[in-house]
Structure formats: structure tokens, C-alpha cells
Amino acid sequence: MSQQSATRLPNRAEGPVEVAPPAIIFSRAVTIVAEVASRLIAEAPPASRVEMLGRLLEMGAQAEAAYRTNLTAQLFERRVEALGSSLATDLASILATGGHAVEVHLTQLLHRHEKDLLAQTMKFLDPGSEEGLPSVAAQKLRQVSDAAIEQVRHLLADGESGTLAKWADRITHQVQESERNVVAQFMQRQALMGTGFHKGRTYEEALSAKLAQVGAAIGYQVDRCSDQLGLKRSRHGDHVITLDPAATWGEAVRIVTEEKTRGDGSRFGYEAVRKECEQARANRDAAAAVFIAETRDSLPDGVGFGQVGRADFFVHFDPGTGDDVGLVAALYLARHAALQRLQSSGNADVDRVAAKRLVDEIRDRVERRDRIERFHNSAVKAIHGAARALGEDTEAVLACLARLDGLLVA
């Protein structure tokens, strides 16, 4: 019965791909469109193409795993998706309305969308290089925009303005397909950065790069100041994060980070972390502080995320893993705490109850995530330990059996 079950032909309704970990089985012919992967596989000898495909799948899986723990990358993707949804609504409205100015309105909309997308990519990556992602995104999107405008121009010239509304979905699809390519390239680069982020860098250098990336996404400026004396003539406070004045009603609002590497040795208790945050805030004239440690062992009770004061937080961040969920959450919570201290009347419209509810949920979920991760790591260690013990016992039993067999035969 088990043999029949293992060798049965798959039901076509189940799809062409079956998974029996660690194996992936293609049960019938299937076409996968993958531009880069297809080129690499084409260059490989036919006899080694299956092996090459397996390696590419593993690398892609590693990239996907890195993406799932990279909140910065997911923020970028969400913002691009929001731009695409807004474009679809506005485009449908323009084409449905029609009129003599439809071409002008369409051109303005697509160019504005192009500008907004470019602004988002520039926040995350350096736009200086002509081969950089912001430049590539601008070129691709301009090509799509120009083609869409040309299509509409031909329709108007042929007197077919009544069919314009039917083109809304087609043009939106073309633009969003271009955006998906931009997002895919960004994810690939994030995965590459995640696997080699810390190589050749000190912890502070790697953290500086990460803070700058997150800062661009959230909207603040990051300055590294660990080698400079502050207001208290000390070097407490390694990075100063200045929030966008547009979000602070013109007031200067800062967050400071205090960082500890593996080499710093001993574990910091809750009171020690609170004191470090307090000294960093005072020295850098900041409204909130985030204590960042390279290892959990440096943090109170080995916990990877927590709060030690109204505006003071601590978090574990290891550049080698690329997991920035706790770091991004801590910076968001610190920003909220810093903004709460503003006395300007400009913040009167903020729904404080809703904001507090979201802050509480973020903190609770990140803390729960940290607990689950610790339990998971403990379970993995226990499983590995049990596997070693089973192996040792098996070897010992075999040795004893061999010795017993020798005694009995003798």
C-alpha cells in the first residue's frame, strides 16, 4: 500500500509541482519565466543543469527568508504597491472622463507617478550611478509611460476616444509590471546585502549603513558621532537621528542610539541599560534613546527587545542575519515617544488614543516574536543535543554488542 502511494501519478488538479522535503518534484512539463536564471542555466553544461537549478532555488529561498525578516524591504514594497493602486484609480478616472485634455492629464499623471516612484527608490538606494536601481527604474518607467501616451494619442487621432476607458487596465498593468521588476531587483540587492552585510566592516559601520537605510525609509537623518564629544563632554551616544522637521512641526527632535558589540563583554541589566540611555540622551540632546546590542547575551535576561523607560528602548541587532524587525520597531516606538514630548499646537490633530493602541500592539507583538524565537532556538538546540545523544547511545550499544558477541563466540 505504501509503495503504491509513493509511486502514484499525481492528480493534475494538484498542479505540476509536488513537494516531499527535501525534494521538489516536477510531475509534468511546466514553463518558468526567469530571465536571469535562464541565462545562467543556458551557460551550464546540459548534464549539470538540474544541479544548477537546485542551487538557484536554494539561493532564491535564502533571499526569500532574508526578505521575510527585513522590514525595510517590506516597507519599500508596500509603498510601491500603494503608488500603483493610486495610479490605477486616477488613470481610470481620467480615461473615463475623456475630453480634449485627456492626453495632457494622462501625461501629467504618468510623469507625476514616475517622479513619486523615483523618490521612493532614491530613499532606499544611492541614485548616483547610471546603473543604479533609481536610474534603472526611471528609465523603465519612462519607456512604459511614453508607450502608454503614444497609444492614447493614436486612439484620439483615429477618433476612438470612446474606447479610452478600456485602456485603463492595460496601461495600469504595464506600469505595475514595470514596478514589480523594480521591487524584484530591490529584493535581490537586499538579499545580497543581507548575506554579506557585515563582511569587512566593524559592527558600528554595518549598523551605520543599516540605520541610514531605515532612516531614509522612515524620514530622518542619521549622523554618526561616536568619536565626538557631546554636551556633557563625553562620548555617550553613537548615532544621532534627527527627525524630518515637516513631521515635528518645525522643532528639532532627536533620537540617540547607544551600541554595544560582542567585545563589550558583560551583560547589562535593566537598570544599566536605562542609565546608558539616560546618559546618551543628555549628552546628545535627544528626546528618546535606543540601546542596540550585537548579541542577546549583552541585554537584560538575554531578551532581544524591551523598554526600560518612557522613551528608552533596547534591541538586539545582528547585521549578519539581516533581521531588522526589532530594530525598525524600536526606532518607530522611539520616534513616537519623542514626538509625544512636543508641546507645539501643530500636533493637536493627532489621534493619541489610536496611536497608543498601535504602539502597544507593536511592542507586544515584537516582544512575543522575540520570546518565540528564543523558544525556537532552545528547541533546535535540544533537538540537536538529543540527536547527538541518540547517536552516541547507538554507537555505544553497537560497541557493547560487538564485545559481547566476541565473548560468546570465544
Image: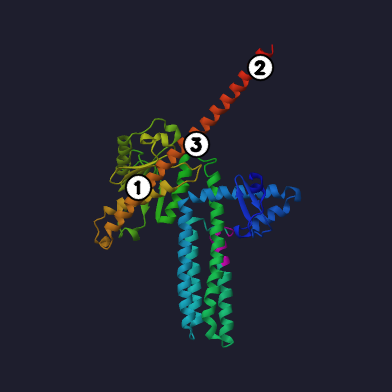
Residue kind at label 2, given as amino acid type: Asp
Q: Earlier in the sequence, mark 3 or mark 2?
A: 3
Q: Label 3: how many residues lie within 10 Å, few (<14), some (14-19) or many (20+)?
A: few
The residue at the far front in this view is 1
SS assignment at label 3: helix
Instruction: Give the vertical position of 154 relative to 134 (above or below).
Output: below
The reply to whether callout 3 and callout 2 are in contact (CB within 8 Å) is no
Image point 72% across, 54% down: which residue? 42
- In space, the residues marked 3 and 1 are separated at their CA atoms by 24 Å
| Residue 26 position within the rendered picture, expressed as x and y whole percent measured from the top left | 66, 53
The reply to whether callout 3 and callout 1 are in contact (CB within 8 Å) is no
Q: Is residue 135 magenta-colored?
A: yes
| Residue 58 position within the rendered picture, expressed as x and y whole percent measured from the top left | 61, 47
Image point 47% across, 37% down: which residue? 377
Q: Which of marks 3 and 2 is in front?
A: 2
Disc marking residue 364: 1
Residue kind at label 3, given as amino acid type: Val
Magenta stretch in the rendered image: 130-140
Whether residue 3 is visible here, answered yes or no, is yes
| Residue 334 position within the rendered picture, expressed as x and y whole percent measured from the top left | 34, 49
